[in-house]
Image (cartoon, helix red, strand yellow):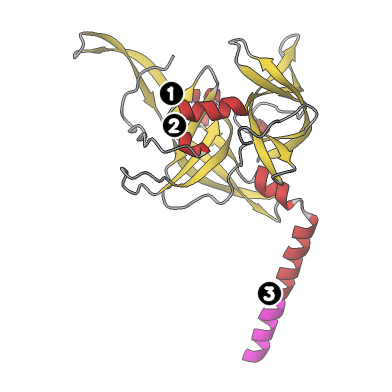
Amino acid sequence: MTRAIAIAAISAALVVAVLMSAARAEAPVKQIEEMLYPTVMVDLGRSGMGSGTIIWSGRRQHESWADEGVWSLVLTNHHVVAGAVQIKKEFDPKVGKETQKETRRPVHIRLWDYNDYSTAVGTTGRVGRILAWDKGRDLALVRLDDSERQIEHVAALWPEHKGGPYLFQATWAVGSGLGNPPYPTSGLLSGISGKDAQGRALFMSSAPIIFGNSGGSLWAYSKPRDRYEMIGVPSMVSAYGWGTAVSHVAWSRPIVEIRAFPRENDFGFILGDADKAKPPPDEDSDHADKD
Protein backbone atom coordinates (compact mmCIF):
# COMPACT_ATOMS: atom_id res chain seq x y z
CA MET A 1 0.00 0.00 0.00
CA THR A 2 2.79 2.42 0.90
CA ARG A 3 4.55 1.68 -2.40
CA ALA A 4 1.33 2.33 -4.33
CA ILE A 5 0.80 5.65 -2.54
CA ALA A 6 4.39 6.68 -3.25
CA ILE A 7 4.05 5.81 -6.95
CA ALA A 8 0.77 7.74 -7.13
CA ALA A 9 2.38 10.78 -5.49
CA ILE A 10 5.31 10.67 -7.93
CA SER A 11 2.92 10.34 -10.86
CA ALA A 12 0.88 13.33 -9.65
CA ALA A 13 4.05 15.39 -9.26
CA LEU A 14 5.12 14.48 -12.80
CA VAL A 15 1.72 15.51 -14.15
CA VAL A 16 1.96 18.88 -12.37
CA ALA A 17 5.49 19.38 -13.70
CA VAL A 18 4.38 18.58 -17.25
CA LEU A 19 1.42 20.96 -17.00
CA MET A 20 3.63 23.75 -15.62
CA SER A 21 6.15 23.17 -18.39
CA ALA A 22 3.39 23.34 -20.99
CA ALA A 23 2.00 26.54 -19.45
CA ARG A 24 5.43 28.11 -19.48
CA ALA A 25 5.86 27.19 -23.15
CA GLU A 26 2.54 28.84 -24.04
CA ALA A 27 2.78 31.93 -21.82
CA PRO A 28 4.83 35.02 -22.71
CA VAL A 29 6.86 34.37 -19.57
CA LYS A 30 9.63 36.85 -20.28
CA GLN A 31 7.19 39.74 -20.70
CA ILE A 32 5.23 38.71 -17.62
CA GLU A 33 8.25 38.32 -15.33
CA GLU A 34 10.11 41.40 -16.53
CA MET A 35 7.21 43.88 -16.86
CA LEU A 36 4.19 42.65 -14.90
CA TYR A 37 5.74 41.14 -11.78
CA PRO A 38 7.72 44.28 -10.71
CA THR A 39 4.51 46.36 -10.83
CA VAL A 40 2.74 47.11 -7.53
CA MET A 41 -0.25 49.05 -6.27
CA VAL A 42 0.34 52.06 -4.02
CA ASP A 43 -2.65 52.37 -1.70
CA LEU A 44 -3.32 55.43 0.46
CA GLY A 45 -6.80 54.36 1.53
CA ARG A 46 -9.20 57.31 1.44
CA SER A 47 -6.53 59.47 -0.18
CA GLY A 48 -6.61 57.32 -3.31
CA MET A 49 -4.38 54.80 -5.02
CA GLY A 50 -2.00 54.48 -7.92
CA SER A 51 0.76 52.27 -9.21
CA GLY A 52 4.47 51.81 -8.60
CA THR A 53 7.42 49.77 -9.81
CA ILE A 54 10.06 47.93 -7.80
CA ILE A 55 13.35 49.27 -9.18
CA TRP A 56 15.82 47.92 -6.60
CA SER A 57 15.97 45.18 -3.98
CA GLY A 58 19.09 44.06 -2.16
CA ARG A 59 21.59 44.91 0.54
CA ARG A 60 23.37 48.24 0.36
CA GLN A 61 27.15 48.14 0.31
CA HIS A 62 28.79 50.92 2.30
CA GLU A 63 31.66 50.57 4.74
CA SER A 64 30.33 53.13 7.23
CA TRP A 65 26.95 51.44 7.56
CA ALA A 66 25.88 48.63 9.81
CA ASP A 67 23.87 45.95 8.07
CA GLU A 68 20.36 47.36 7.68
CA GLY A 69 19.04 44.30 5.93
CA VAL A 70 17.33 44.35 2.57
CA TRP A 71 16.36 47.59 0.88
CA SER A 72 13.43 47.27 -1.55
CA LEU A 73 12.56 50.50 -3.34
CA VAL A 74 9.42 51.46 -5.25
CA LEU A 75 9.32 54.30 -7.77
CA THR A 76 6.01 56.09 -8.23
CA ASN A 77 4.57 59.53 -8.96
CA HIS A 78 4.66 62.30 -6.39
CA HIS A 79 0.97 62.97 -6.97
CA VAL A 80 0.20 59.35 -6.03
CA VAL A 81 1.71 59.73 -2.54
CA ALA A 82 1.08 63.47 -2.07
CA GLY A 83 -1.79 62.69 0.32
CA ALA A 84 0.72 61.12 2.72
CA VAL A 85 2.93 64.23 2.78
CA GLN A 86 1.82 67.13 4.94
CA ILE A 87 3.55 70.49 5.09
CA LYS A 88 2.39 73.11 7.54
CA LYS A 89 3.68 76.21 9.24
CA GLU A 90 4.50 76.00 12.94
CA PHE A 91 6.13 78.40 15.33
CA ASP A 92 9.66 77.26 16.14
CA PRO A 93 10.77 78.67 19.52
CA LYS A 94 14.42 77.89 18.72
CA VAL A 95 14.50 80.37 15.84
CA GLY A 96 11.70 82.59 17.11
CA LYS A 97 9.55 82.45 13.97
CA GLU A 98 7.24 80.27 11.94
CA THR A 99 8.90 77.55 9.89
CA GLN A 100 7.60 74.92 7.52
CA LYS A 101 7.43 71.42 8.94
CA GLU A 102 6.91 68.26 6.91
CA THR A 103 5.54 64.91 8.03
CA ARG A 104 5.28 61.73 5.96
CA ARG A 105 2.74 59.05 6.73
CA PRO A 106 3.39 55.43 5.77
CA VAL A 107 1.78 54.13 2.59
CA HIS A 108 0.60 50.62 1.79
CA ILE A 109 2.27 48.73 -1.05
CA ARG A 110 0.42 45.78 -2.56
CA LEU A 111 2.53 43.16 -4.34
CA TRP A 112 0.31 40.96 -6.51
CA ASP A 113 0.48 37.17 -6.49
CA TYR A 114 -0.29 35.17 -9.62
CA ASN A 115 -1.21 31.64 -10.66
CA ASP A 116 -0.40 30.31 -14.12
CA TYR A 117 1.68 33.46 -14.73
CA SER A 118 -1.40 35.62 -15.35
CA THR A 119 -4.24 35.03 -12.90
CA ALA A 120 -4.13 37.51 -10.02
CA VAL A 121 -5.01 35.62 -6.84
CA GLY A 122 -4.44 38.30 -4.20
CA THR A 123 -1.84 40.60 -2.77
CA THR A 124 0.97 40.54 -0.25
CA GLY A 125 0.94 43.83 1.63
CA ARG A 126 3.95 45.83 2.77
CA VAL A 127 4.24 49.09 4.68
CA GLY A 128 6.26 51.65 2.75
CA ARG A 129 8.05 54.83 3.86
CA ILE A 130 8.54 57.79 1.54
CA LEU A 131 12.28 58.41 1.24
CA ALA A 132 12.25 61.25 -1.28
CA TRP A 133 9.87 63.17 -3.48
CA ASP A 134 10.10 65.76 -6.22
CA LYS A 135 6.92 67.66 -7.07
CA GLY A 136 8.41 69.20 -10.20
CA ARG A 137 9.42 65.85 -11.66
CA ASP A 138 6.30 64.24 -10.19
CA LEU A 139 8.37 61.36 -8.81
CA ALA A 140 8.67 59.73 -5.39
CA LEU A 141 10.76 56.92 -3.93
CA VAL A 142 9.32 54.56 -1.29
CA ARG A 143 11.18 51.97 0.78
CA LEU A 144 9.40 48.83 1.95
CA ASP A 145 9.60 48.21 5.70
CA ASP A 146 10.40 44.53 5.08
CA SER A 147 14.18 44.30 5.63
CA GLU A 148 14.38 40.50 5.52
CA ARG A 149 12.86 39.36 2.22
CA GLN A 150 14.39 40.40 -1.07
CA ILE A 151 12.02 40.96 -4.00
CA GLU A 152 12.75 38.56 -6.83
CA HIS A 153 11.40 40.53 -9.79
CA VAL A 154 12.86 44.02 -10.19
CA ALA A 155 12.56 46.37 -13.16
CA ALA A 156 15.59 46.83 -15.40
CA LEU A 157 16.07 50.49 -16.33
CA TRP A 158 17.05 51.52 -19.86
CA PRO A 159 20.79 52.18 -19.40
CA GLU A 160 22.73 55.37 -19.97
CA HIS A 161 24.97 56.02 -22.96
CA LYS A 162 23.51 53.15 -24.99
CA GLY A 163 21.30 55.17 -27.35
CA GLY A 164 17.51 55.24 -27.48
CA PRO A 165 14.78 54.67 -26.80
CA TYR A 166 13.54 55.61 -30.27
CA LEU A 167 10.35 56.71 -31.98
CA PHE A 168 8.29 53.83 -33.38
CA GLN A 169 9.61 51.40 -30.78
CA ALA A 170 6.88 49.18 -29.38
CA THR A 171 5.91 50.17 -25.84
CA TRP A 172 3.95 48.60 -23.01
CA ALA A 173 2.35 50.49 -20.13
CA VAL A 174 1.71 48.48 -16.96
CA GLY A 175 -0.28 49.69 -13.96
CA SER A 176 -3.33 49.26 -11.76
CA GLY A 177 -5.75 51.27 -13.88
CA LEU A 178 -9.06 51.96 -12.07
CA GLY A 179 -7.85 49.91 -9.11
CA ASN A 180 -7.56 46.65 -11.03
CA PRO A 181 -4.66 44.22 -10.64
CA PRO A 182 -1.75 45.45 -12.79
CA TYR A 183 -2.37 44.93 -16.50
CA PRO A 184 -0.52 45.80 -19.72
CA THR A 185 -1.49 47.89 -22.71
CA SER A 186 0.59 48.24 -25.86
CA GLY A 187 1.42 50.96 -28.35
CA LEU A 188 4.32 52.88 -29.84
CA LEU A 189 6.74 55.48 -28.52
CA SER A 190 5.11 58.44 -30.25
CA GLY A 191 7.15 61.38 -28.95
CA ILE A 192 10.37 61.89 -27.02
CA SER A 193 10.54 65.68 -26.83
CA GLY A 194 7.32 66.58 -25.04
CA LYS A 195 7.27 69.15 -22.23
CA ASP A 196 5.01 69.70 -19.24
CA ALA A 197 3.80 73.09 -17.99
CA GLN A 198 7.11 73.60 -16.13
CA GLY A 199 9.18 72.70 -19.19
CA ARG A 200 10.26 69.28 -17.93
CA ALA A 201 10.70 66.45 -20.41
CA LEU A 202 7.95 63.94 -21.20
CA PHE A 203 7.62 60.86 -23.40
CA MET A 204 4.40 60.34 -25.34
CA SER A 205 3.17 56.81 -26.00
CA SER A 206 0.07 55.40 -27.66
CA ALA A 207 -0.07 52.59 -25.07
CA PRO A 208 -3.28 53.62 -23.25
CA ILE A 209 -3.28 54.55 -19.59
CA ILE A 210 -6.13 55.60 -17.32
CA PHE A 211 -6.69 56.72 -13.72
CA GLY A 212 -4.73 54.42 -11.42
CA ASN A 213 -1.92 53.84 -13.94
CA SER A 214 -0.09 56.86 -12.54
CA GLY A 215 3.24 55.87 -11.03
CA GLY A 216 3.40 52.61 -12.99
CA SER A 217 5.81 51.80 -15.78
CA LEU A 218 6.41 52.30 -19.49
CA TRP A 219 8.58 49.68 -21.20
CA ALA A 220 10.48 49.02 -24.41
CA TYR A 221 12.35 45.94 -25.56
CA SER A 222 16.12 46.06 -26.05
CA LYS A 223 17.18 43.55 -28.68
CA PRO A 224 20.94 43.79 -27.92
CA ARG A 225 20.34 43.19 -24.20
CA ASP A 226 17.42 40.79 -24.80
CA ARG A 227 15.22 42.19 -22.08
CA TYR A 228 12.31 44.55 -21.46
CA GLU A 229 13.51 47.78 -19.88
CA MET A 230 11.67 50.55 -18.10
CA ILE A 231 11.80 53.83 -20.03
CA GLY A 232 9.23 55.96 -18.21
CA VAL A 233 6.68 56.48 -15.44
CA PRO A 234 3.13 57.08 -16.75
CA SER A 235 1.92 60.31 -15.21
CA MET A 236 -0.90 61.92 -17.21
CA VAL A 237 -3.14 61.73 -20.26
CA SER A 238 -4.28 64.38 -22.68
CA ALA A 239 -7.84 65.66 -22.46
CA TYR A 240 -10.28 67.72 -24.51
CA GLY A 241 -13.60 69.47 -24.04
CA TRP A 242 -14.86 69.19 -20.48
CA GLY A 243 -11.94 67.09 -19.36
CA THR A 244 -12.59 63.97 -21.44
CA ALA A 245 -9.45 61.82 -21.21
CA VAL A 246 -7.70 60.62 -24.36
CA SER A 247 -6.16 57.49 -22.90
CA HIS A 248 -3.98 56.65 -25.92
CA VAL A 249 -2.24 60.05 -25.78
CA ALA A 250 -0.33 59.11 -22.66
CA TRP A 251 2.55 61.03 -21.12
CA SER A 252 5.34 59.54 -19.01
CA ARG A 253 8.27 60.90 -17.04
CA PRO A 254 11.24 59.77 -19.16
CA ILE A 255 14.20 57.65 -18.18
CA VAL A 256 16.52 60.67 -17.98
CA GLU A 257 14.34 62.08 -15.17
CA ILE A 258 14.11 58.67 -13.51
CA ARG A 259 17.92 58.58 -13.29
CA ALA A 260 18.32 62.21 -12.19
CA PHE A 261 15.81 61.95 -9.34
CA PRO A 262 17.56 59.35 -7.11
CA ARG A 263 20.97 60.87 -7.83
CA GLU A 264 19.88 64.29 -6.63
CA ASN A 265 18.59 62.67 -3.43
CA ASP A 266 21.74 60.60 -2.75
CA PHE A 267 20.20 57.28 -3.80
CA GLY A 268 22.33 56.89 -6.90
CA PHE A 269 23.38 53.41 -5.76
CA ILE A 270 20.16 52.28 -7.46
CA LEU A 271 21.91 53.10 -10.74
CA GLY A 272 25.24 51.56 -9.81
CA ASP A 273 26.82 54.75 -8.43
CA ALA A 274 28.96 54.75 -5.29
CA ASP A 275 26.72 54.61 -2.21
CA LYS A 276 26.72 57.94 -0.36
CA ALA A 277 24.97 56.33 2.58
CA LYS A 278 22.19 58.83 3.14
CA PRO A 279 20.08 57.43 6.00
CA PRO A 280 16.30 57.26 5.57
CA PRO A 281 14.22 59.84 7.46
CA ASP A 282 12.78 58.85 10.81
CA GLU A 283 9.05 58.25 10.75
CA ASP A 284 8.27 61.11 13.13
CA SER A 285 11.02 63.54 12.12
CA ASP A 286 10.46 66.90 10.45
CA HIS A 287 11.72 67.69 6.98
CA ALA A 288 12.21 70.94 5.14
CA ASP A 289 9.85 71.69 2.26
CA LYS A 290 11.62 70.97 -1.03
CA ASP A 291 9.71 73.47 -3.11
Q: Earlier in the sequence, mark 3 or mark 1?
A: 3
Q: Position of residue 91 (x, y in %)?
A: 25, 11
**From the viewer's perspective, is 50 left or right of 85?**
right
Question: On screen, 120 above or below 13?
Answer: above
Residue hosting label 1: 85
Q: Position of residue 107 (x, y in %)?
A: 47, 34
> In the rendered structure, which amino acid carries the disc numbered 3?
Ala
Q: Residues within 10 Å of mark 1 (few under 14, many from 20)?
A: some
Q: Residue at x 30, y 42 (%)?
A: 64
Q: Residues within 10 Å of mark 3 (few under 14, many from 20)?
A: few
The disc at residue 202 is none
Magenta stretch: helix, strand or loop mostly? helix
Residue hosting label 2: 130
Q: Which span of residues is magenta-colored?
A: 1-12
Q: Is residue 176 visible?
A: no
Q: Residue at x 62, y 29 (%)?
A: 255
Q: Quadrant of the N terminus?
A: bottom right
Residue hosting label 3: 13
Q: Earlier in the sequence, mark 2 or mark 1?
A: 1
> In the rendered structure, which amino acid carries the disc numbered 2?
Ile
> In the rendered structure, which amino acid carries the disc numbered 1?
Val
Q: Quadrant of the C terminus?
A: top left
- Report if residue 9 lies within the magenta region: yes
**For this rendering, which residue is in front, 194 or 148?**
194
* Quadrant in the rendering for residue 171: top right
* Quadrant in the rendering for residue 127: top left
